[in-house]
Each structure stands twice: as structure tokens, then as C-alpha cells.
Image (cartoon, grey):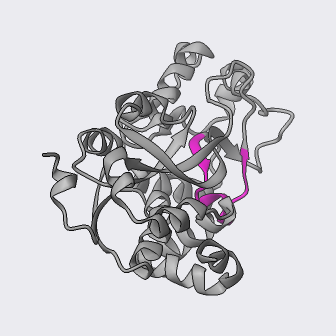
Amino acid sequence: MNPAEQQPSDTLVYGRIDESFHQVAAAVVEEVLRRLGHTVDVVEGPHPEMYPQLATGEMDLFADAWLPGGHEVYWEQVKESAVEAAVLYEGCMFYWAVPAYIPEDLVSSLEDLAKPEVVERMTTLAVQGTTPGAGLTMRSETLIESYGLAKVGWSQEIGDLQAIIDTVNQRMSAGDCFATPLWQPQYLNDVHELRPLADPLGAFPAPDRASLLAYRQSWENLTEETRRVVSRINYPLAAVNEMDRAVNLDGKDPLQAAREWMERNPETVNAWFA
């Protein structure tokens, strides 16, 4: 028997990626499940650890998967045993960005980063990446080669979400000229003027949807009411930035940030339960 099938019917194992913007997106669903009377056991970790657990039924639900492009490699691992239960928000995307104070006629595209005058202007040619298993990290490694950036000295440093946040905050405060891997939703886009760079070679996928996934058997075991309500959960990408900002700047935990956003947006939330 799969681990998920051994859980009491009102207890759900709910996985999420251990980065704040994923945590708040997942927390909205957690709060809905709690309002529906479920006990929710939250587990979290990096991408490569979470998806295999969903595939084997060690978790009942997982949020959030960027489909079809961002998490494509991970979806391939779970598509036979999982279902897409809800589209939580749309428009999530990866890109590289530079500070808006760098003239746009100098840098507007990833290919501009290879120009001698741009290389000379930059404070650093090292970009701070996130975890090795993240879609952004893997695609950034590829684009450094495909745009010829490695040949002129560009490189990516592996780190984590906090490393990116700290690097962007420090370099923006110092007025540095730099590039950073980034994405939406991410609260840094709301607090700094950062310009996404055009990607003519298509190193990054088109904007994705962020979805709640469910282990197939677990989803079928849920009541019709729970499936109906959960499948309706949908909110704007801007809401994730708002909640993410509350976590990173106001010290809220993800569930608290989600609950406060839901309280400020009763019409949206009530429509899920209608």
C-alpha cells in the first residue's frame, strides 16, 4: 500500500518547495484545506526531493509546479501518477535582469552581455544563481554557453534563494552594474527597478502556469466538495509577490501571509467555496 493511502481520510500530506514564493503560493491551498476540515501535514524541500515523493504517493498534494516549461523535467517524473488539480496563478517566468539605471540602449538583451563595452562596464561578470536543481539554474547554465557569455568571462555561482536576495539588495544599494537570474513572482521585482533582458534564442520557456498537483489516488479519495473547491483556487501573480513581500520584509510566516491576503480579498476567496 502506498504511504498516501495509509493516511486517515481527513489528513493530507502536502509538499511544497522550500522557497518563500513557492511557500506562500502553497499556503493559500493549505488554508483552504484547513477550512474544509482537513488536517494538513506540510513537508518541504528542494525540487529534486519533492517530485519523487509525489510520484510514489508519499505526499497527497504538491504546490506549485511551473508548467509546461519551467518544471518540465520534473513533470516527466510524475505525469503517470499525478494529476493537475488546479491552476493557482498564471504568468510565472524566468529571465535575467539588470538594474534599470544601466542604459537600455547599452543592455536590453542577453546577447548584449557579450559585447566588449558591456563587459567593461559591469562591476562583476558572476551571476548569483539559486539551488542546483532549480529550473532557472539549469537554464542559466545553458544560456551562458548559447549566448557566448562564458567566452567573455560570465559565470554562474550556485547558491539559494537567500543568496539571490542578498546579492540583489547589496548590489542595488551599491549602484553596481550586474546581471541577475530572476523570475516572476518574486517580491524583489516590486522593491527594485530591475529590467528583464530579451531572450531572442529562447533559453527560457514562455510564461508558465503554476499548478497544484495531486497524487492520482489521493485526489480520487478526496470528497467531491474538496475537489470542487480546491480546483477553483486561482489568484493573480501579483498576490504571490504581495505575500512573498510580507514573508521577506515583514517577518510573516507563509501561512500567516496567506491568511492575511485572503482576508483582504474575500470576494476572490468566497468564489472558490461558492
Q: Position of residue 65 (x, y in %)?
A: 48, 45
| Residue drawn where x is 37% and y is 37% of the image | 158
| Residue drawn where x is 58% and y is 19% of the image | 149
In the rendered structure, does residue 247 fall within the stretch colored magenta? no
Q: Position of residue 36 (x, y in %)?
A: 43, 78
Seen from the viewer's position, the closer of residues 123 and 238 is: 238
The residue sitting at the right extreme is: 105
Q: Is residue 59 depicted above or below 208 in this figure?
A: below
Q: Is residue 50 left or right of residue 139?
A: left
Q: Is residue 136 left or right of residue 234?
A: left
Q: Is residue 8 depicted above or below 101 in this figure?
A: below
In the rendered structure, does residue 186 fall within the stretch colored magenta? yes
Q: Position of residue 18 (x, y in %)?
A: 35, 56
Q: Position of residue 201 (x, y in %)?
A: 69, 18
- In this rendering, does residue 17 appear at all? no
Seen from the viewer's position, the closer of residues 185 and 60 is: 60
The residue sitting at the front extreme is: 224
The part of the image, by quadrant, that contains residue 256 is: bottom left
Seen from the viewer's position, the closer of residues 3 and 190 is: 3
Seen from the viewer's position, the closer of residues 113 and 68 is: 68
- In this rendering, does residue 135 appear at all? yes
Q: Is residue 7 depicted above or below 207 in this figure?
A: below
| Residue drawn where x is 20% and y is 54% of the image | 5
The part of the image, by quadrant, that contains residue 159 is: top left
The magenta region covers 180-195
| Residue drawn where x is 64% and y is 77% of the image | 274
